[in-house]
Image: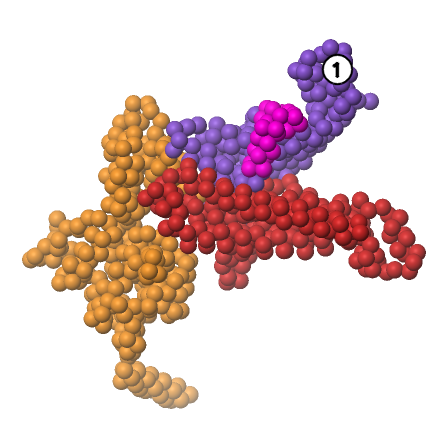
Amino acid sequence: MNFWASIVASQTTLLTGLWNTISSSLLAIAISTVVGILFGIILAYGNRIVKIPFRIYVDVIRGIPGLVIVFSVYYFIDFWLRSIGFALPPFAAGFIALSVNAGAHVTENVRGALQSIPKGQIDAGKAIGMRFGQILWYILIPQAVVRMLPPWLNTITEIVKGSSLLALIGVAELLLTTQQLIAKYNNALFYYAYVGVIYLIINVAIESVGKYAEKKIGRGINA
Amino acid sequence: MKKGLAIVLVVTLLVGICSVAFAAVTPYKSKLHEVLERGYLIVGTGSTNVPWHSINEKGEYEGFDIEMARILALGLFGDASKVQFVEQASDQRIPNTLADKVDITFQFMTINPTRAQQVAFSIPYYTEGIGLILKTGGKYKNYDELVAAVAAGQTVTIAILQNADATANVQRMVAGSKDDQYESQGLVYQAVDSGRADAGAVDLSSIKWLASKNPEKYTDSGFAFNPQNYGAAMNPYDQVWINYVNQVLLDCMTGATYPLYTAAYEKWFGETPTAPNIGMPSMFRAK
Amino acid sequence: MAYFINFGLIWKYIPEFLQGLGLGLVLAAISLFFGMIVGILLAFCAISKNKFAHRFASGYVTVLRNIPLLVLTFFCYFGLPDAGIMLSKNASFVFALSLYAGAYLTEVFRAGLKSISPGIVEAGAAIGLRKYQVMLSIQLPIMFRNVLPSLSNNFISLFKDTSLASSITIVELTYLARKVNTITFRVIEVWLIVGLMYMVTCYLIAFLLRLIERRLQIK
């Protein structure tokens, strides 16, 4: 069977793989963003002692390769769950590991964006009688969003690329389904090139949506 | 005091005898009768291991394990289609079988003494081994050429799935060769396909299946070792059911239903097994 | 099933782990070297006025930055032999990692070149230096000093990326971790130790490179 015919014949498999890549990435993006915003706020404005565990989380994760985090999360959580009688499906381990990894990066982005806003604005907010929550919501976050958007988009691309690591713990995402097809049809050269192009398309699409959003938000703030 | 003790003893004895007698009259209901009444067999298996158990384009289960289950259903109901397959992961094979979620598990399960303490195994229906798969038209044509190449001082690389005995097993197969340990079976095949490895150490059943399906791609080196028996697993507390399953399996390997086993074997392993002897049953013959 | 943490079985593998770690550092260093060559060449393409060169550089960066390194690794290891290119195991990984690093370093160097004020380049031209002389003796040295911190960060990233070499059976730290897991089944202990080794190495490299950067700063 020639290459394109085999692609057409196996499109259901490939689409399942694509769906697993997209769904694990989306879950990881959602979780890491929520975690990152919370932890970022704590690191930017928290009390020195409260900050310690969050600082450790960020620094530890940033010093360990993503693949090692994927394997560790898979085995740590799985071992713990097994002791109470459950088995962790690789997919769950996968998106949790991606979230843990990306969460540290989002945390740093948020912290950096918040701290780049001059302190005087907080004082000004206090002076007109706003509570911290109000200052955060009305003054700091709108400005931080503009500043953290570019690195956040970068993190999303990293998550999508990182989801390929889940192939190594047995999640049938794009890369693993491609490898299953290579086992069936040979032709590793074309298949790996093909899957590379699919990742490229996904990421370029994310980038252009991001650029568009940046423009819109930037305009909203300036107006 | 002594008299009292004697009475207690006699009463206990009587109660004991009565209860045994009572149990004997209660009709003993085996899984065998339960399955017959239900009208179909529930079999635990997997879906990701060709040629044992997988799902085809039509969404049906197929493979050698599946054929064995169908032979059992044919024996029970005279209809090979009366089977409901239940998907289970490898580590659910024992729990599901013990909890009676399935009547029986056909899932390339290796019989070993530890597992046999938990579940009852049927007689083996296949003896698996580790073999060496070669690329057709590749550097080496058979096992002897691999060994000769090592003897001649060439580097022979053998791809194998990462496991505790990987290095030792590769050395037992081709002493002096180099082992590359991959994280998945698929990558082992890719290493053979791309020429990264001179041979791949995989289950003999997979080699037989692949070499019979794609002779232009793969060749069996003709070497295998490390025998492991595959048997079906059942709840150990039902001897009637266990006996029945064993009778059906024994018959299909040595008796009247032998054509069923042969057909399955030819379909999945591309070979015809040796026919049973007429006269003294094969398994009791010296050689 | 109770699991008791027991590091006893792991200690004897530490020398092997350290060797694996060393191999990772070597692979990262070689890839950084080749990646820098790619990066410098493409950075000059990116800032050049030649439309084709400019497009080529930006196309390269877009493609390589958006494809997972693992896909690239498998492509070079299993795919290229189909095209008749059979690099050795280590060479094919270094090739993949260098191509990948090249994309990130192009961005680094481009920014470094852009940060040089045009006046300096013009001054070079004014004293009669040829274009390549301006490049070699003015632009490159200034750019290198500017981008040193980014280079350090890239080296650390590359070192972490060498963990992917385990997938094509290169015997570095992650590969050894998985191997020891299958022998001892001390999964938790092995990943704790290996994670710690990666982390300590990363921070150590960062610390050393900061020292060097400080040395090279103009006072």
Give the camera-side residue of B120 and C8: B120
* Residue at 82% over, 47% down: A117
* Residue at 36% over, 68% down: B102
The residue furthest right is A127
Give the camera-side residue of B160 and B225: B160
* Residue at 42% over, 44% down: A179
Q: Residue B4 placed where, x, y %?
A: 40, 89
- Element under disc 1: helix
Badge 1 sits on which subunit?
Answer: C
**Quadrant in the rendering for residue A162:** top right
**Chain assigned red:** A
Using the image, determine if residue C209 lies above or below residue A108. Answer: above
A57 relative to A14 in the view: left or right: right
* Residue at 41% over, 64% down: B95
| Position of the C terminus of chain C by quadrant | top right
Chain C: what color?
A: purple
The residue furthest top is C128
**Which secondary structure dominates the residues rendered in magenta?**
helix
B31 relative to A43 in the view: left or right: left
**Location of mark 1 (residue):** C124
Where does the magenta region start and end? C35-64
Using the image, determine if residue C69 lies above or below residue A32. Answer: above
Chain B: what color?
A: orange
**Quadrant in the rendering for residue B221:** top left
Q: Is residue A83 magenta?
A: no
Say what amino acid the circle numbered 1 marks. Gly
Q: Residue A19 placed where, x, y %?
A: 50, 54
A55 relative to C42 in the view: left or right: right
Give the camera-side residue of B247 and C93: C93
Q: Residue A211 placed where, x, y %?
A: 66, 46
